[in-house]
Image (cartoon, coloured by chain):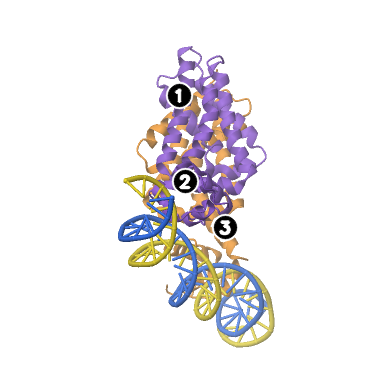
Chain colours: A orange, B purple, C blue, D yellow
Amino acid sequence: MAPTSETLTAERILVATEEVLRRHGPAKATVVDVARALGVSHGSVYRHFRTKAALREAVTKRWLDRTSEALAGIAADEDRTPEARLRDWLASLFAAKRRKAGLDPELFATYSVLAGESGEAVAEHLADLTGQLERIVRAGAESGVFTAPDPAAAAGAVFHATDRFHDPCHARAWEQPGIEAEFEAVVELVVRGLRAA
Amino acid sequence: MAPTSETLTAERILVATEEVLRRHGPAKATVVDVARALGVSHGSVYRHFRTKAALREAVTKRWLDRTSEALAGIAADEDRTPEARLRDWLASLFAAKRRKAGLDPELFATYSVLAGESGEAVAEHLADLTGQLERIVRAGAESGVFTAPDPAAAAGAVFHATDRFHDPCHARAWEQPGIEAEFEAVVELVVRGLRAA
DNA sequence: CAGCTGACAGATATTGAAATCTGTCAGCAC
DNA sequence: GTGCTGACAGATTTCAATATCTGTCAGCTG
């Protein structure tokens, strides 16, 4: 790593940390590695992040936020019907997770470990995602195509019912044949459950 | 362990293995330990189980079968409505898992590890459970209270939609406050999804 | 003085030698 | 003969010594 002479910023540290995690994996990535990659002493890294855990959590947050952004657009697209948005949102979430897990399993495993450590960042991320779902469910309830006395609870139920297709602990199942059909069947069941009686 | 002079049977070995697993955990339980507990040489254990993996799989199978049996009664109770049976079945499965995980977390973790190793036994167990669900769904479809063109697929969807409440990888969530409400919301969504349109 | 360095203490990880385990099998005992 | 033993080879695990890492801070540098 060329020790560039730019100012050392939190941003540059995060980029370098991602690279170190990609190369070494979560167990072997050290703060010293990150400092070495940046051509600085490891003491300097601690000037920007109080602990190694904080650094890892910041990296995790960036990674999770990237997923949320792509989905926010679908949730907010008021031109489409709530059911179409819901199906698209769930399919996009599943596709994104599956693609990441399939393309670079080691990196995905790395981030899964990080996510397991970063309770706070993950909780925020999940709240963000169910918030997006709630927006769709609420739109459906208001236009009368969904029945949902409590849109927040219904959004949570939809999210949990599709856990198998977005929770990293099920990543191995995403490569199995027939997973697409399983996904379609669950989405069908969930959408039917939301529809106005 | 008293070296009883009874004949060495597969059954006795399995009981001893469960005890060793309970005491030592999955990582440290050895075939030598099992033999020592029985007061025999470890060569004798290999007379009944070809490999350590086979022994562990047999123990896992017994454990899984115990869960299935309790639920089979609910699924087969033709005197009750399909919806009542379905709700009861799902609640019983969740309650059983939660109780086991909460009562003795280490033992539960032990069996979760074993289950992760024993692909074959687990696949059979899952097929058994979805078979029970299919029986309930089919009864509902035949009596007209459920709409399910493909009862097997619908049963699979119900099972996967409730993954969060029976898959061991979610065990930590089962202790959190509000999990009961989450469960109720998902079951409600699923039951509504099955009901005749 | 603002930002960085590098040495330090205590905690954690690595390493390689020694101990234990898995799976086999020739032979003992009943 | 049937069922068990115990020694064995190769693989795996343990353990303690060694090395590295985390987090701090006094002091250097520009």
Residue ID for mark 2: B8
Tags 2 and 3 touching, CB below 8 Å = no
- For the residues beneath circles 2 and 3, the answer to whether they share a chain is no
**Above or below, B96 relative to B140:** below
Protein chain holding label 1: B
Using the rendered image of the protein, determine whether residue B148 is visible from the camera's viewpoint: yes
- For the residues beneath circles 1 and 3, the answer to whether they share a chain is no
Mark 2: few/some/many CA within 10 Å (<14, 14-19, 20+): some
Amino acid beneath label 3 = Glu
Residue ID for mark 3: A57
Camera-nearest label, 1 or 2: 2
Separation of disc 2 and disc 3 at Cα? 54 Å
Q: Left of A164 or right of it: where is A50?
A: right
The picture places residue B15, in percent across and down from the top left corner, at 53, 44
Amino acid beneath label 2 = Leu
Looking at the image, which residue is at 55% across and 14% down? B79
Using the rendered image of the protein, determine whether residue A69 is visible from the camera's viewpoint: no
- Count of numbered circles in the view: 3
Looking at the image, which residue is at 56% across and 32% down? B93
Q: Which is more toward the observer, B2 or A134?
A: B2
Camera-nearest label, 2 or 3: 2
